[in-house]
Amino acid sequence: MSLKNFLEEAKKKDKIPLIVVLGPTAVGKSKLAIEICKKYGGEAVSADSMQVYKGLAVATAKPSEEEMQGVKHHMLGFMDLNKNFNAYEYAKMVEKILEDINERGLLPVLVGGTGLYIDSLLKGIKFTQDDTDLGLRAKLDEEAEKKGTAHLYEKLSRVDPEFALRLSPNDKKRIIRALERYMTTGQTPGRLNIESQAGVGKYKPICIGLDFHDRQLLYNQINLRVDKMVEQGIFKEAANFFNMPSKSKTASQAIGVKEFFPYFEGRTSKEDCIENLKQATRRYAKRQLTWFRKNKDIKWFYLDDFNSEKQLYSKVYTYLNTIS
């Protein structure tokens, strides 16, 4: 079946056809998404939790106007840095954007590395505005600092033992998130996950993943990207954010910003901050891959199998033109 037939079949079934380009940071997702949009008549929709913010273009590797090559992009650089943003707001906005692109007869191409945002669409996860309670989250974080992550894990195990078994007892962030959702909705995380599946079926996606067989090659790409960010002025961007009187908790978690705070506070050198950023980005890439590996519907393309970007794109087009 060709891509054309795939798209026609999706529309016959009243589904929105969707190409998703995903993977860890620094593998060239945006480049591939732009090429797909150019070839098949599409528009790109970012699935990056930090690219929504103004003033973080360098830190979030937001594509420049030149790099976009005339392809229309959505969900980039519209949110003020003092405002929080979450998966609920993302899903609500992007659903309308995808519908609009589809209604105009174009192909929506979702591109990014924030697994929760992608899953919120593809798996029909139904978030509510009340799912995020930053005050409660801060209290739980403080409780973890005082009594330890194991204490919170025990608490989660009492309310939802099956879901707790899926988490590491040391995964403070996800444990806090699970407890937060339970305490704000009155439902266990496992029950919320089951009920979220009711929304599945709105889209007919083709998921394309980019990665390297050789993990060191990915890390080399990450190191090169950080060096390029330094050349592009990431210190100035981070300094502007550091000096803001009011910052959102969401934006404050952006990799490429918080790693430079110790330098601005006079506690370490620029060079140490750059190395810490490279390390933090490598760790983030590992977390991204762990998340995406759970999705068995992703067709992976490994960059070290190709001699050039052109060869990679050709292979992706062949795959899309023979999709079944």
Image: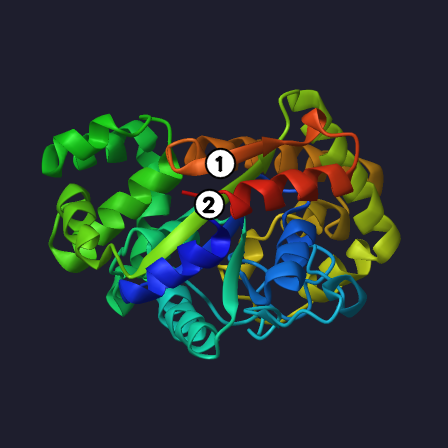
Label 2, label 1: how far apart the Cα atoms are? 6 Å
Tell me the kind of residue under disc 1: Lys
Q: Count the marks: how many?
A: 2
Q: Are marks 2 and 1 in contact (CB under 8 Å)?
A: yes
- In what quadrant of the picture does the C terminus appear? top left
Residue at the disc numbered 1: 299
Tag of residue 207: 2
Look at 62% across and 22% down and name the residue there: 213
Q: Nearer the viewer, residue 147 or 287?
A: 287
Residue 316 horizontal side relative to residue 177, left or right: right
- Going from N to C along the chain, the mark reached first, 2 or 1, is 2
Q: Quadrant of residue 91?
A: bottom left
**Secondary structure of the residue carrying numbered label 1:** strand
* Whole-percent x, y for residue 81 in the image: 58, 69
- Residue 65 in the image, given as x and y percentages of width and height: 76, 69
Q: Is residue 260 above or below residue 157?
A: below
The residue that appears at 75% across and 53% down in the rendered structure is 264
